Image (cartoon, rainbow, N blue to C red):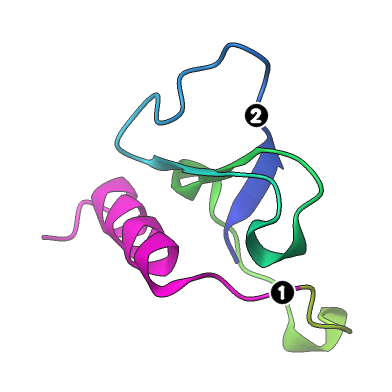
Amino acid sequence: MLHTEAAPRGEARNPGPTTVFMPSGTANLNRDSLVLAHQTTTMDRSKLTARVGSLPELTLCAAERALLHALAIK
């Protein structure tokens, strides 16, 4: 599970290699957000109750690259 949070106003859209900007509307987000791959965690599948949305392929690839960078995997 990748952590997301609302993007602060004026924040750079991609402030680092482990973050990915997601504009409002992406995966049904109601405001601009950032994927924070450096704050990745695990959780039990039973805690996931409903699908919120899905990422477009380009955003998913960017999140994957950010995660690989955060985990120091080439």
Hey, what amino acid is under mark 1? Answer: Gly
In the rendered structure, does residue 37 fall within the stretch colored magenta?
A: no
Task: Determine whether 26 is above or below 32 in the image.
Answer: below
**Residue shown at 46% from the left, 19% from the top:** 12
Q: Quadrant of residue 46?
A: bottom right
Q: CA distance from mark 2 to mark 1?
A: 18 Å
Q: State the residue in front, 68 or 25.
A: 25
Q: Does residue 30 appear to the left or right of 4 in the view shown?
A: right
Task: Give the image location of residue 39, x and y in percent.
Answer: 55, 45
- The single residue placed furthest to the front in the displayed view is 25
Q: Quadrant of residue 71?
A: bottom left
Badge 1 crowding class, 10 Å Cα cut-off, few under 14, some 14 to 19, many 20 or more, is few
Main secondary-structure element of the magenta-colored stretch: helix
Q: Quadrant of the N terminus?
A: bottom right
Hey, what amino acid is under mark 2? Answer: Ala
Task: Give the image location of residue 49, x and y in percent.
Answer: 89, 84
- The single residue placed furthest to the bottom in the displayed view is 46
Q: Helix, strand or loop at disc 1?
A: loop
Task: Tell me which segment is drawn in magenta.
Answer: 53-74
Q: Which residue is mark 2?
A: 7
Badge 2 crowding class, 10 Å Cα cut-off, few under 14, some 14 to 19, many 20 or more, is some
Q: Helix, strand or loop at disc 2?
A: loop
In the rendered structure, does residue 58 fall within the stretch colored magenta?
A: yes
**Residue shown at 62% from the left, 76% from the top:** 54
Q: Which residue is mark 1?
A: 53
